[in-house]
């Protein structure tokens, strides 16, 4: 099989299981985080007054990733951006908003979202490995997506792709989104990400304190985790039991 077809085939397969990589990151990252907690001498900021600021910076980095996803999904037409796992979907070619500065804004958002947990391990080499694995994993997915878009939109896609970078944004090219921001769509699609961020950091903090026999819990993370989970279940209830978050045809 030619290399191009092989890469596309791998990308299509990885696209369906792209939720697997975060689980691997969490598993390995969790073990390294516990190792750092038990051996504070391995991390420069461990048990110092600056540790709390570093931890909050990691949370902030993850929230940046979520913000990128929220803006992208909120300004995207129906069946173009989201969390589908069955296969590539694109009824229209997105070329405005975040898509005017980078071709894969959702994967850029995912990178920052998962970079936070990788950083909080305090292991420099794990962060480097994470970045390399993320690129190798998503490079094939992006390749498969671009092959799909090339076949469907032809010259329109080629012209856009030649002027917009794949992963590192060019902010000077920003164009105002054609689609108005759809808050209802964002609430339904991105509630998982918000809850997951604070659950992960809160779980790391509580587990770290437990294994080191300390009780210096991060109250901000605990409260934020509780609130975001209440928010998650509220949105889920409103989606299933009411029509408040139903979208009109114009909103889709």
Image: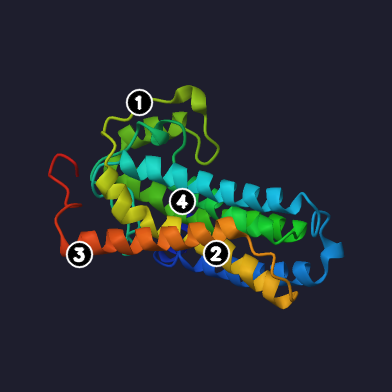
- Please give the residue where the numbered disc 1 appears in the rendered image: 176
Which sits earlier in the primary sequence, circle 4 or circle 2? 4
Asked if disc 3 and disc 2 are in contact, CB closer than 8 Å, the reply is: no
Q: CA distance from mark 3 to mark 1?
A: 33 Å
Task: Name the residue nearer the viewer: 70 or 135.
Answer: 70
Query: What crowding class fits label 4: few (fewer than 14 Cα within 10 Å), some (14-19), or many (20 or more)?
Result: some
- Please give the residue where the numbered disc 2 appears in the rendered image: 200
Give the foreground label among 4 and 2.
2
Residue 107 image offset from top left, x and y in percent: 48, 49
Query: What crowding class fits label 3: few (fewer than 14 Cα within 10 Å), some (14-19), or many (20 or more)?
Result: few
Residue 61 image offset from top left, x and y in percent: 58, 47
Residue 201 image offset from top left, x and y in percent: 58, 61
- Please give the residue where the numbered disc 4 appears in the rendered image: 143
- Please give the residue where the numbered disc 3 appears in the rendered image: 240
* Residue sitting at x 31%, y 33%: 156
Asked if disc 3 and disc 1 are in contact, CB closer than 8 Å, the reply is: no
Label 4 SS: helix
Image quadrant holding the C terminus, namely top left
Which sits earlier in the primary sequence, circle 4 or circle 3? 4
């Amino acid at each position: 099989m030619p290399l191009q077809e092989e890469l596309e085939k791998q990308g299509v397969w990885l696209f369906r299981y792209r939720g697997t990589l975060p689980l691997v990151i969490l598993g390995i990252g969790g073990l390294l985080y516990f190792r750092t907690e038990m051996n504070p001498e391995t991390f420069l900021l461990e048990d110092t007054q600056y540790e709390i600021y570093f931890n909050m910076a990691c949370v902030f980095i993850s929230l940046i990733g979520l913000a990128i996803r929220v803006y992208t999904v909120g300004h995207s037409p129906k069946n173009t951006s989201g969390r589908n796992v069955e296969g590539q979907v694109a009824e229209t070619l997105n070329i405005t908003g975040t898509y005017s500065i980078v071709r894969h804004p959702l994967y850029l958002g995912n990178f920052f979202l998962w970079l936070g947990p990788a950083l909080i391990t305090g292991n420099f080499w794990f962060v480097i490995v994470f970045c390399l694995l993320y690129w190798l994993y998503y490079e094939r997915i992006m390749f498969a997506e671009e092959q799909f878009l090339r076949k469907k939109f032809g010259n329109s896609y080629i012209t856009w792709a030649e002027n917009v970078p794949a992963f590192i944004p060019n902010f000077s090219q920003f164009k105002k989104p054609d689609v108005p921001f759809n808050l209802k769509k964002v609430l339904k699609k991105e509630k998982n990400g918000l809850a997951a961020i604070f659950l992960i950091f809160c779980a790391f903090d509580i587990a770290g304190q437990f294994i080191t026999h300390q009780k210096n819990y991060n109250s901000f993370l605990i409260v934020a985790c509780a609130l975001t989970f209440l928010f998650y279940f509220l949105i889920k209830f409103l989606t299933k039991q009411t029509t408040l978050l139903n979208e009109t045809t114009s909103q889709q």
